[in-house]
Amino acid sequence: MRRDARGDPASSLIVVDGSQPFTYHPAVPHEPTTQVAFRLADRMLARLDRHAKRLGKEHAGIKFTRADAVRDLLTRALDDVEQRKSAR
C-alpha cells in the first residue's frame, strides 16, 4: 500500500477503475463520504481523544484520529439503537 500525502501508514490513496483517487482507511467503508463539522464541549473532546487512544491500543500499529473515534462511536450507538428498535 502506498502512503497518503501525510505519510499516514493507516491510510492509502487508491484509484479504482480510473476513477478519482480516494483515501482508504480501515475505519471508513468503501462508500462516498461527506465532511461534517460540529462543536463539542472540551470535556467531550477529551473523552473522544481518550477513546481514539484506546482504539490505538486495541489495534496495535494503527493510529486512530478523532474522526476515527467519532465514526466508531456513532456506528456503535446507531447499531445499538437500530437493534433495539428492530427487537420491539
Image (tube, rainbow, N blue to C red):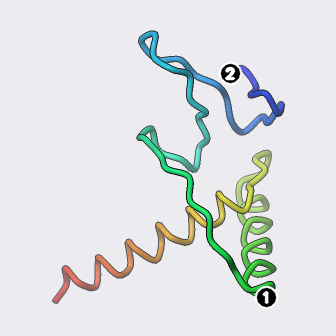
Is residue 46 placed above or below 34 in the rendered structure? below
Could you tell me which secondary element the residue under label 2 belongs to?
loop
Amino acid type assigned to the residue bearing label 2 in the image: Met
Q: Residue at x 76, y 78 (%)?
A: 45
Comparing marks 2 and 1, which lies closer to the viewer? 1
Q: Looking at this view, name the residue that lies furthest to the left.
A: 88
Is residue 88 placed above or below 12 in the rendered structure? below
Which disc is residue 52 wearing?
A: none
Is residue 46 placed above or below 52 in the rendered structure? below
Is residue 81 placed above or below 3 in the rendered structure? below
Q: Residue at x 50, y 70 (%)?
A: 74
> Measured from the top left, where is residue 55 in percent x and y?
71, 63
Query: 48 or 88: nearer the eye?
Result: 48
- CB of mark 2 within 8 Å of CB of mark 1? no
Q: Earlier in the sequence, mark 2 or mark 1?
A: 2
Query: 1 or 70: nearer the eye?
Result: 70
Residue 41: quarter of image: bottom right
The quarter of the image holding the N terminus is top right
Residue 37: quarter of image: bottom right
Residue where numbered disc 1 is placed = 43
Amino acid type assigned to the residue bearing label 1 in the image: Arg
Which disc is residue 1 wearing?
A: 2
**Dot 1: few (<14), some (14–19), or many (≥20) neighbours within 10 Å?**
few
Relative to 80, is 53 on the left or the right?
right
**Dot 2: few (<14), some (14–19), or many (≥20) neighbours within 10 Å?**
few
Relative to 5, is 35 on the left or the right?
left
The quarter of the image holding the C terminus is bottom left
Q: Looking at this view, name the residue that lies furthest to the top.
A: 18
Query: 41 or 63: nearer the eye?
Result: 41
Q: Residue at x 57, y 50 (%)?
A: 27
Could you tell me which secondary element the residue under label 1 belongs to?
helix
Marks 2/1: CA–CA distance: 36 Å
